Image (cartoon, rainbow, N blue to C red):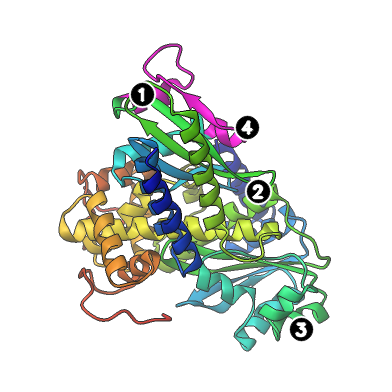
């Protein structure tokens, strides 16, 4: 592992968490760093909605095919198994029979992925989600790298619970719903921007995120203002009104 | 994974309406929410902007007062949930946290006999339709299973509120409920993306865009996710000037 990159990652994540941050943007940062640190082809953070559903919160690419791989895992797949058992789940050659998860394996292989790993996001005895890693090569992740991967999954959990008082289990549920709703705001904004400019969803996401970073605003706030604002102009023509 | 669970929850709402010999309404969602989580009472308020506004239904006089207090004081769990789009699960109104957060509401609520208050935003992304408030005489947390059911009921209330604001005939006819559990049980990003796209295609606010999307799927007898997928893939555009039953 690139130890300079590991140090930079640690610093970046810590810096973010001590400041005022947007949870979806933070989880995107984490998936980006996971890909680079662990030699993965793609990564995503999936959260367990109490309604009984696994929902993607952030991924290293907003490309529809990758997001679909997470949605598929509501029926079968490493994230579902990881959520149910609370333990890491590994598969090192999805194209080789027998297939543990036939539909998922088929979709993942078609997307170019042969190896998959799911690390649990745990808080005491509760599993609140998973960090899902994909690789194009059909060989497993290095055990030392997997220790870092689990640490990154733990950091994702900590980021989600950025309120001080984590002893109350109610806080977990509240924060989870806020994050899930922020994700929906982001999807609505992607749709509006993609339609407005005739671009794809991944490009729309990048524009929203880059604008938020440059304007030093929360990604979710930018997305919400864009969706609820009367104008479809982007970048928005007037200054953001705080506290709206 | 969730189809049957959402259908079971919606089924209880429909059954409640049936036993009262009327069409499904928000009052049924409220009543089922109270019963399924073994709480004491509940209320539902529509939103105006980021704040709760008028109260649409209550299950009992104490709930009515809890709802009205928050509107009068301009503080309370119902205000917080609309601002943050996250539920507020105040399991014990006697703890320091509740007094600190709602210095006016908390003592008043306790005097009325509320030991715990649980508020749920009726939101879908940037859409803010209202708030569902519930209370229990005794303090104590909500078990996880009941929390999940309440979230499903909050989703039901959200679409019903949106349809009553924006919908046409579909909102009056109870049969529109038939497809809803399946359509809304499993969250699909395409539905949210299509909603955003429709704000531009139809030139309407996001709440109306979502109502029009669902009304179109219903009128075409198609799954919501499939219609949304077609819109996102640009195989389908909804016509701007026609009603929800307009063609491709």
Q: Quadrant of the N terminus of chain B?
A: top right
Tag 1's secondary structure?
Answer: loop
Q: Is A94 included in the stretch rendered in magenta?
A: yes
Disc 4 crowd, CA 10 A, few/some/many (<14, 14-19, 20+): few
Q: Position of residue A131 (x, y in %)?
A: 48, 41
Above/below status of B109 relative to A53: below
Q: Which residue is mark 2?
A: B12
Q: Furthest residue to the top?
A: A97
The lab-note entry on whether marks 3 and 1 share a chain reads no
- Disc 4 marks which residue? A85
> Disc 1 marks which residue?
A114
Q: Are marks 4 and 3 on the same chain?
A: no
Of circles 4 and 3, the one toward us is 4
Find the magenta span and give its range.
A80-109
**Residue at far front of view:** A4
Does B160 sit left or right of B204 as displayed? right
Q: Quadrant of residue A216?
A: bottom left
Q: Which residue is located at x 46 percent, y 70 percent?
A: A20
Q: CA distance from mark 1 to mark 4?
A: 22 Å
Local SS, label 3:
helix
Say which of marks 3 and 2 sits in front: 3
**Mark 2 — on which chain does it sit?**
B
């Amino acid at each position: 592992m690139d130890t300079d990159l590991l140090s930079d990652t640690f610093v970046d994540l810590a810096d973010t968490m001590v400041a005022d941050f947007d949870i979806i943007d933070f989880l995107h940062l984490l998936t980006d760093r996971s890909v680079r640190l662990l030699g993965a082809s793609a990564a995503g953070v999936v959260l367990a909605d109490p309604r009984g559903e696994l929902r993607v919160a952030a991924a290293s690419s907003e490309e529809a095919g990758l997001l679909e791989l997470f949605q598929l895992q509501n029926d079968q797949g490493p994230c579902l198994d990881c959520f149910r058992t609370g333990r890491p789940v590994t598969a090192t050659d999805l194209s080789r029979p027998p297939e543990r998860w036939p539909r998922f394996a088929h979709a993942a292989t078609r997307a170019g992925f042969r190896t998959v790993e799911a690390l649990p996001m745990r808080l005491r005895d509760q599993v609140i989600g998973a960090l899902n890693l994909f690789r194009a090569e059909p060989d497993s992740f290095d055990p030392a790298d997997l220790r870092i991967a689990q640490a990154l999954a733990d950091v994702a959990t900590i980021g989600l619970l950025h309120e001080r008082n984590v002893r109350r289990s109610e806080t977990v549920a509240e924060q989870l719903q806020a994050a899930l709703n922020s994700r929906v705001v982001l999807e609505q904004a992607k749709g509006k921007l993609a339609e407005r400019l005739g671009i794809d969803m991944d490009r729309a996401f990048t524009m929203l995120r880059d604008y938020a970073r440059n304007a030093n605003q929360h990604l979710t706030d930018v997305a919400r203002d864009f969706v609820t604002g009367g104008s479809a102009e982007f970048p928005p023509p007037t200054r953001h009104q705080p506290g709206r | 994974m969730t189809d049957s669970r959402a259908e079971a929850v919606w089924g209880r709402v429909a059954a409640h309406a049936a036993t009262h010999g009327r069409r499904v309404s928000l009052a049924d969602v409220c009543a089922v929410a109270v019963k399924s989580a073994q709480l004491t009472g509940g209320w539902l308020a529509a939103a105006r902007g980021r704040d709760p506004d008028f109260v649409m239904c209550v299950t009992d006089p104490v709930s009515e007062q809890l709802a009205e207090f928050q509107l009068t004081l301009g503080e309370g769990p119902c205000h917080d949930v609309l601002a943050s789009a996250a539920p507020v699960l105040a399991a014990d109104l006697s703890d320091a946290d509740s007094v600190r957060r709602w210095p006016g509401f908390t003592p008043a609520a306790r005097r009325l006999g509320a030991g715990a208050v649980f508020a749920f935003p009726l939101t879908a992304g940037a859409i803010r339709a209202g708030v569902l408030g519930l209370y229990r005489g005794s303090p104590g947390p909500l078990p996880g299973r009941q929390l999940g059911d309440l979230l499903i009921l909050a989703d039901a209330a959200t679409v019903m509120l949106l349809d009553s604001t924006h919908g046409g005939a579909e909102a009056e006819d109870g049969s529109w409920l038939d497809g809803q559990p399946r359509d809304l049980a499993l969250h699909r990003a395409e539905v949210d993306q299509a909603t955003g796209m429709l704000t531009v295609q139809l030139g309407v606010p996001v709440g109306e865009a979502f109502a029009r999307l669902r009304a179109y799927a219903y009128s075409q007898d198609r799954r919501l996710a499939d219609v949304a997928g077609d819109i996102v893939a640009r195989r389908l555009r909804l016509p701007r000037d026609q009603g929800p039953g307009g063609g491709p």
